[in-house]
Image (cartoon, helix red, strand yellow):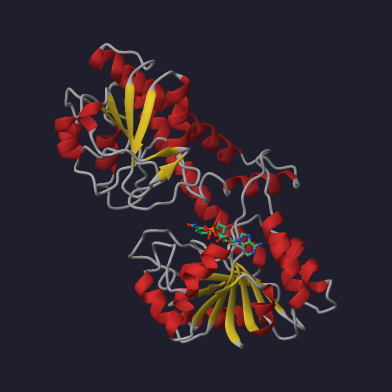
Amino acid sequence: MKRDVAIVGAGYVGMPLARVFANAGKSVVLIDVDAGVVEGINRGESHIGDVPSGELKRLVDDGRVAATTDYDALEDADAILVALPTPLSSQREPDLSIVRAAVEDIAKRLRKGQLVVLESTTYPGTTRECLQPILESTGLKAGDDFHLAFSPERVDPGRTDWTTHNTPKLVGGLTPACTERAAELYRSAVETVVPVSSPEAAELTKLLENIFRAVNIALVNELAQLCERMDLDVWEIVEAAETKPFGFMSFKPGPGLGGHCIPIDPFYLTWKAREYDFYTEFIELAGKVNANMPYFCRSLISQALNHGAQKSLKGSRVLVLGVSYKADIDDVRESPAEKIIGLLNKAGAEVAYHDPHVAEFDGMRSVDYAPEEYDCVVIVTAHSAIDYDDLVERAQIVVDFRNATGRNGTGHAKVWKL
Ligand SMILES: NC(=O)c1ccc[n+]([C@@H]2O[C@H](COP(=O)([O-])OP(=O)(O)OC[C@H]3O[C@@H](n4cnc5c(N)ncnc54)[C@H](O)[C@@H]3O)[C@@H](O)[C@H]2O)c1
C-alpha cells in the first residue's frame, strides 16, 4: 500500500512523528523490530505517553497509521525517516550498529525518488560518512536519484507546551535540493522548519543543545556540593538568580543525569573531535561532575541517617521515591536511581522503591506507599502524584534531591536537602 511517510523505529521519537504527520493528513507506516509494539499500535494502543491511545486508535481506524515488522513496507513510501537508538558502547564510544543495520535494510529497498532522513542524535558526519555510502551502494546517487538529509528530533517526553508539532525543526540536506525536499515534507506537518547549510551543521546543532544542558547542569551540581560545605541552600541561590530578567538561565541540581540523551549524546562529539586532535574539555568535565552526583548523594543519605537517627546505612531500611529519570514519566533509561540504589545496596542498606509510573525496576517491584515504615525516604524523582507535605509528616527522615519538599522542607528537622 502506498504511504507518504515510513518511520523506522516506533519509540519516543518515532511515535510522536507519526502522530504529527498523520494529523496533517499523511498516511504513515511505522516499522519496528518489536512485534509486541507493532501489534499494540495496530490495535490503537500506544506505548508512548506523548501519544494518547484514543487518538492513535482513531488514526489507525482511519487508515492513516499502520505498523509492521516488515521492511518491505518501505518500497511504497515516498519518505523514510529513521528514528532509531544511538547508544554508547561499553567503552563509551558511539554505537551506530542499529542505525547501520537498518540503513542496510533500507538500501535493499531504496528506489528512485525517495527521501531518506536520519532523525537519531549522532556525531557530525554520520549522514555523509555512514548513510550515504550504504545507500549509494545500490548504484543510486544521493542528490540525483534520491534525497538524503539529517533532521534532529527535539522532543522532550512528557512536555505539553513544546511538542513535535510546534518545536522548530532543523533540516540539513546533502545538497540544496535535499534540504528543500526534506523541508517541504516537514513543513506539511510542523509549524516551523529551519533549514541549515549541511547535515553536519544540523548534527552538530543538536549536540550543542544537549551539551549546553549537560554543562549547565554540571555547573549547578558543582555549586550544590560547595553549598553543602558552606552550609548554604543551593535551591535558594538558584531561585534568587532566576529573578534576574536577562543573562541567566536556570538549571536545577539533582542526583545525576538521566534519559537517553544528555548522559550519552555529548560523548558522540568527544569521540568525533579526537579525529581532529581536539579534546572537548567542557564535556569531559561536565561528565565527571555529573557522574559523581550519585556518590555525593549516597554520602548525604549516610549523613542524614547518622545525624537524624544515629543509624548507619548498613542495615537501614531506605525507600527510594521515584525511579524514572524525570518527573511524571515512566522512562527509566540511564536513570540515576539505578546507580543510587546500587550504591545503597553495596553499603548494606535494605532498599525498596515506590514509583507510581514504574511497576518494575532493576529487578524490583514498586512497593506500596508507606513512608513511615522506613528509616529514611530518598526523593530521587519528584513525581507530582506524591503529596510531599504528607510525606514529611509521615516519614522518619527525608532526603530530598529535587527540592520536592520546597519551603516546608527547608530547615525542617526531618529533611535533608541536596
Ligand atoms: N527520547 C527522546 O527524548 C529523544 C529526544 C530527541 C532525540 N532522540 C534521539 O532519537 C533517537 C531514537 O530515540 P528514541 O528515544 O525514540 O528510542 P526508542 O528506544 O524509544 O525507540 C526506538 C525504537 O526502535 C526500535 N528498533 C530497534 N532496532 C530496530 C531496527 N533495526 N529496525 C526497526 N526498529 C528498531 C525499537 O524496538 C524501539 O521501538 C535516538 O538517537 C535518540 O538519541 C531521543
Q: Quadrant of ligand 1?
A: bottom right
Instruction: Tell me if residue 280 comes above or below residue 79 in the rendering.
Output: above
Image location (x, y in percent) of residue 68 = 59, 73
Residue beneath the point at 77% across and 83% down: 144
Please name the residue shown 31% across and 21% down the image: 230
Q: Nearer the viewer, residue 314 or 401?
A: 314
Q: Position of residue 178 (x, y in %)?
A: 67, 78
User: Percent from the top left, x then y, of residue 414?
Assistant: 19, 24
Q: Quadrant of residue 77?
A: bottom right
Whether residue 255 is visible = yes
Residue 55, image quadrant: bottom left
- Badge count: 0
Vertical side of 61 occupied by 233: above or below: above
From what the image shows, is residue 394 above or below residue 27? above
Q: Quadrant of residue 145?
A: bottom right
Q: Is 360 left, or right, of 13 in this rendering?
A: left
Residue 2, given in percent of the width and then of the height, sits at: 61, 88
